[in-house]
Amino acid sequence: MNEKLQELTRKIYDEGLEKGKNEALEIVEKAKMEAESILTKAEKDAKNLLEKATKESEEMKKIVHSELAISSRQALTSVKQKIASLINEKAVDMALTKSFNDKELMKSLMLKIAENWGEISKSSQGVIMYLSEKDKQELEGFLLKNVAGVISEGFDISFEEGIKSGFRIGPKDKSFKISFTDKDFESFFMQFLRPRTQKFFTEES
């Protein structure tokens, strides 16, 4: 009886032990499979992240290169515009300074305007010519002798602050003034020269 009981006990023990071993092996195998799956997923995720980072890096590089190219072009354009503006200013300034310093040219222009004043204005109140203090002193004799005789309605000469070179002329009622100062001609010639100078730089680039 005791022997049978011991045998049964041993059998139950062995079966339990075997079952435990099998379950342990299953758990280990399952853990290995899960670990491989996790590792595979991790490798795949890492690869995707690397590809994404590489793509974003390339896109950022293209954007940076594009912005640098645009900035370079803008800087070059700005420099060209400054050079063109400087050339225009120097060219106009030199030409106008030379012209307005030529008093014979100024006298000729003043006399021509006086001779045609009747067509410019129908006012019968006479004419005032506005000059810089320096030109007023230098040209007053000529104007009173030559221009005043042409304008029958009356002719006066006045100093006007703000005029550096050239002159302004208008009726005594001050209804309008026609301006022939260095600033007026500078503005006119700058408008004429600017597109031509810019075209030159565009063709050179």
Image (cartoon, rainbow, N blue to C red):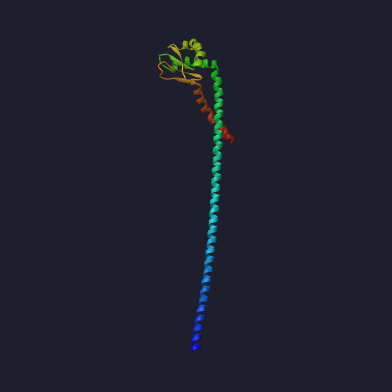
Q: Which quadrant is home to the C terminus? A: top right
Residue at the (58%, 34%) spot, across then down: 203
Where in the figure is residue 42, as x and y percent of width and height? 53, 61
Residue at the (55%, 29%) spot, across then down: 86
Q: Where 73 sits versus 134, above or below?
A: below
Residue 173 is drawn in which quadrant? Answer: top left
Judging depth in this view, the residue of 24 and 13 nearest the camera is 13
Q: Where 28 sits versus 139, above or below?
A: below
Where in the figure is residue 58, as x and y percent of width and height? 55, 50
Total marks shown come to 0
Residue at the (45%, 20%) spot, across then down: 178
Where in the figure is residue 35, as x and y percent of width and height? 53, 66
- The furthest residue to the right: 204
Q: Where 192 sits versus 39, above or below?
A: above
Where in the figure is residue 85, as x and y percent of width and height? 54, 30
Residue at the (56%, 42%) spot, across then down: 69
Q: Is residue 152 left or right of residue 97?
A: left
- The furthest residue to the front: 2
Q: Where 69 sits versus 131, above or below?
A: below
